[in-house]
Image (cartoon, grey):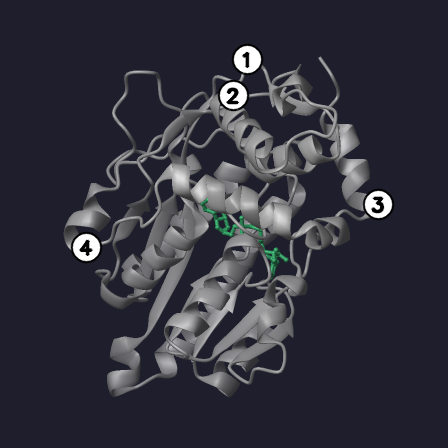
Amino acid sequence: MILVTGGAGFIGSNFVLDWIAAHGEPVVNLDKLTYAGNLENLRALEGDARHVFVQGDIGDQALVEDLLLRHRPRAVLNFAAESHVDRSIHSPGSFIETNVVGTFRLLEAVRGYWSGLQGEEREAFRFLHVSTDEVYGSLAARDPAFSEENKYEPNSPYSASKAASDHLVRAYHHTYGLPVLTTNCSNNYGPYHFPEKLIPLMIVNALAGKPLPVYGDGQQIRDWLYVGDHCSAIRRVLEAGKVGETYNVGGWNEKPNLEIVHTVCALLDELRPKAGGGSYQEQITFVKDRPGHDRRYAIDARKIERELGWKPAETFETGIRKTVQWYLAHGDWVQRVQSGAYREWISKQYAQA
Ligand code: NAD
């Protein structure tokens, strides 16, 4: 049994589905179901006793303590977070509450549980914290990619809150000996990605005939990893990672945002040509840049490749094609997540330049 937090979100739900398919080992899934949590992502597990869902907050220490004692997991994997940079700029409070205070309360509950374990159970226990490359700050064009040795220089309230959580996890290892592992991963894409993030937003807006909002000049560079590859990296780190270590996870796919949008448009032109002819690229609209927008992130994933033998299975070309195909086949999922609240947020966020 493992305990996953945030398992109804984008990466967490992909992880739970992959985990049960790959291992068959039961999962307790603790998720608050914020706007980003969607149990529909886990519909395939309805009625499956290997998935126990609990709606609740990682910051509710008593609840987490109770779950730990009741289910006695061999590992806790923390995916739960407020995750959208733009939202963190407009309202940073919830980011501090969940990513910093929530992680602290979760660590406290886990520390108490782990202290009570004995023998092999205690030896085998792991706390795996899922984090981001954004904690390292922004790179100039010629800088080498982020390695695990880079210092933390977070620039947004989101990345600062994740950096704080990483530091707490590190401190619980150094101070209390808690057997922790941390992964810092680049931008993920794939099925069940909430359509406020770049790739699903472009697909959804393109199909709806709406503008495709690109921040600034669109030359911000990110490294992209297919979500299934992130899940396999997490499984590998949990299985073989060295306690107390951090592992950078990336796809060696540095691409400017505008190129991503062009690729999505080209795939849609091929797979779902526009009724009236022309290209979806005609819908691209440049909007005012995000304040403090980091220019470039790049991940040096050599450590996890060398020490744990992990490599991504997808190239960007295969992963993005799968992703566009998934969104084309799951229009019903997209429609349901597009609640009134979601639409209001998107219209506030992407004011035209
Ligand atoms: P997401 O926003 O899609 O999902 C987050 C999930 O956490 C949601 O289901 C939400 O309901 C839940 N949650 C939020 N606050 C909670 C709380 N207080 N208690 C319990 N559950 C809570 O995020 P995601 O993109 O799936 O990211 C998952 C993790 O991976 C995050 O920690 C994020 O920082 C990290 N990460 C994301 C990316 C990416 O590209 N999306 C890249 C690297 C790392």
Residue 340 got which mark? Answer: 3
Please give the label number shown on residue 258: 2
Residue 49 to residue 149: above or below: below
For marks 3 and 4, give the CA distance.
45 Å
Indicate the quadrant containing the C terminus: top left, top right, bottom left or bottom right. top right
Q: Position of residue 214 (x, y in %)?
A: 61, 21
- Residue at the disc numbered 1: 217
Closer to the N terminus: mark 1 or mark 3?
Answer: 1
Residue toward you, 296 or 65? 296
Q: Are marks 1 and 3 in contact (CB under 8 Å)?
A: no
Q: Is residue 193 visible?
A: no
Q: Residue at x 52, y 45 (%)?
A: 323
Tag 1–tag 2 contact (CB < 8 Å): yes
Is ligand 1 less than 8 Å from the beta carbon at label 4? no
In whole angstroms, how far apart are the C-alphas of marks 4 and 1? 37 Å
Mark 1 → mark 3, Cα distance in angstroms: 30 Å
Q: Which of pointers 4 and 2 lies earlier in the amino acid sequence?
A: 2
Residue type (three-letter) at the residue carrying disc 2: Leu
- Under circle 2, the secondary element is helix
User: Residue most toward the left?
Assistant: 306
Disc on res. 309: 4
- The reply to whether discs 4 and 1 touch (Cβ–Cβ < 8 Å) is no
SS class of the residue under badge 4?
loop
x, y percent for residue 105? 53, 63
From the viewer's perspective, is the residue at label 4 or at label 2 nearer?
Answer: 2
